[in-house]
Image (tube, rainbow, N blue to C red):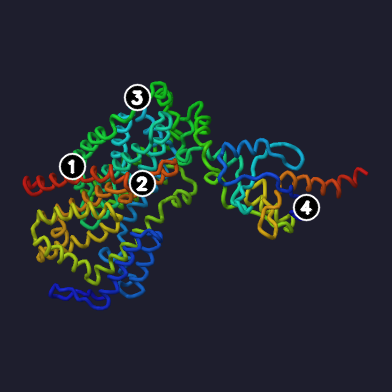
Amino acid sequence: MTQEVAASGQVVMGAPFWIATAIFLLTYGLIVTDKIHKTILALVGASLMILLRIVTQEEAFTSMDLGVDWNVVFLLVSMMIIINIMKPTGVFEYIAIKSAKAAKGKPFTIMAIFSVVTAVVSAFLDNVTTVLLIAPVTLLICQALELDVVPFLITEALASNIGGTATLIGDPPNIMIASKAQLDFMAFVYNLTPVIIVVLIAYVISIKFIFGKRLKVKEELRQRVMAMNENEAIKDPVLLKKSLVVLAITIGGFIMHGMLHFEPATIALAGAALLLLVSGTKDPQHILAEAEWSTLFFFMGLFMIIGGVVNVGLIKWMSIKVLELTQGNLIGTSMTVLWFSAFASAFIDNIPYVATMNPLIIDMAKQLYPNFSGVQLLHHPDIMPFWWALSLGACLGGNGTAIGASANVVVCGMAEKMGKPISFKKFMLYGMPLMVESVIICMGYVWLRYYVLKI
Amino acid sequence: MKAKDLMIPIQDSLSPENTLREAVNHLRIAKKGEEKVGLKGMPVLGKDGKLEGMLSMTDILKAVHPSYMSLMNLSNFTWDGMVESIAKDVANKRVEEVMSRDVITVKEDDPLMECVDLMIKNNIKRLPVVDRAGKVAGMLYEKDVFFEIVKAMLDDDYYVINS
């Protein structure tokens, strides 16, 4: 399939352009309405892109620019495998019970420690996974202390989205950005972790003001928590030791992957394969089957849909419009990307959003620096802040509403099952101000670091 | 032998609006046939007499088992009195929130093997038997099926050999 983009840089709006745009808009529109499962929609959209000859199957399956980004898929599936092997060891129950006891059963201290633990764990694991591992213990602790679970669930979901922003592997948008922008693990640590630490500190202080005074617990109930023996959580100490060693090697691998010139997915795949090998798993079927295939196929479908609209020039057309709007002002563009991403991600899934924004930023870079290409273009000092603004906005923006991030959806589901439903309004009442607070901090950070200090 | 020959005609049922407190009391004092034995499960019928669900002992156990306990391995961290206090909390829940909704039923003229097949494949101990109008006519219990099997075995072999 030939690129529908004329040499002059103008986008040719022929039939393929409108067909691809229609598939794209229809799929995204239906995803927002939530009537049909998003994975099914993504796969239907992807099939149409190939069937209607917008992209070829070869492009959809093998092209980095127009098809499935296997870097993202393999990184996600490998981390899922590692977690699925580790879960039965009881390590996550252990961490959560230990945290509650470290807080001596005091409610706000528990909330603060759980938030920080959730944020730190989220920096290395998927946010939804983290919440699914911490929230059940939180519900148990709240039941023991006869506390309202809702503030704890909301603060954990928000903390997981904050923590996930800190590293390359913490949140799918970062994994996607890293792959497209060819940024390594340490680049994320240098550029995002510092501001996320500040955001997290501000967050804990904020929830102290919001919830601190409301949380009271009877002395005798605290004994229930103090009587819990976290060591009983460990069901398989041998597998736990093996898992922790492999996890340490894997994280070490992530830290080194840039220097060693390996993609992050290679490191994750090697880690998962090593853990499968040393764990003594007889039949890997159930461990592999437990990976979140629906999420993985959602990614694959989206990548193919985005490939279609990239191929016909829609994304390029959008990038021209964005640059017209910001008139090539770099600070203005960064701030627009940051705030637009935050509010967009608060209401729509940040994964399709980032899937669209990645090629858009690359196209913007091409418009701004037509003489550069490859890594020189992607890592141009003027372009780098766009990537960080996109990551910060898209990841933190999820905190704005109950549907902004998968972790929020998960905790709302849990609350409902407990007979304590969290309304859209109630979540937003806490989430939106805290989201705006975090994005204001990021705005100051991006401005100061990349446009004043230029480091 | 058909379902209707072995079923116990329906005497007791619950309404979806009953509270769990009312429901468990009803189960406790219910009769099966002539004897007052208490029941381990009962059909839940709507106003029109149509079957809406079944409420069994397992459903009651599930009602006091917090959903988060199914997500992780937390049994080591529970405390004395936890079940009792949750039981008090859920006592005012309505039957329809707790009952099993997808109930497997048999028709009056269904053969006994069909009933056995459904019991084994779905791991159920009681089957509502519905009449042509779709109303519950009676209940078929695992125990009564068992006694029927016992009778068949003793008639054909044991009885003959011993006489």
Residue at mark 2 shares a chain with residue at mark 1: yes
Assess whether mark 1 and mark 3 are in contact (beta carbons under 8 angstroms): no
Q: Residues within 10 Å of mark 2 (few under 14, many from 20)?
A: few
Q: Which residue is mark 3?
A: A104
Secondary structure under the numbered disc 1 in the rendered image: helix
Q: Say which amino acid is labelled 3.
A: Lys
Q: Amino acid at mark 4?
A: Asp
Quadrant of the image occupied by residue A358: bottom left
Above or below: residue B118 compared with residue A142: below
Q: Within 10 Å of the Cα at label 4, are there few (<14), some (14-19), or many (20+) other Cα atoms?
A: few
**Mark before the other along the chain sequence, 2 or 1:** 1
- Residue furthest left as drawn: A452
Marks 2 and 4 sit apart, C-alpha to C-alpha, by 52 Å
The local secondary structure at tag 3 comes to loop
CB under 8 Å between callouts 3 and 2? Answer: no
> Residue tagged by mark 4?
B5
Vertically, is B75 above or below B46? above
Q: Percent x, y for residue A84?
A: 42, 45
Extreme residue in the bottom direction: A15
Labels 3 and 2 in the same subunit: yes
Which residue bears the numbered disc 2? Answer: A423
Letter of the chain that mark 1 sits on in the rendering: A
Q: Nearer the viewer, mark 4 or mark 1?
A: 4
Q: Earlier in the sequence, mark 3 or mark 2?
A: 3
> Of the residues tagged 3 and 1, which is closer to the observer?
3
For label 3, count other residues whose C-alpha is less than 10 Å away and answer few (under 14), some (14-19) or many (20+). Answer: some
Locate residue A243, reporting x and y percent.
Answer: 38, 39
Chain containing mark 3 = A
**Mark carried by residue A195:** 1
Query: Rounded to the nearest whole Å, what is the CA distance between mark 2 and mark 1?
Result: 30 Å
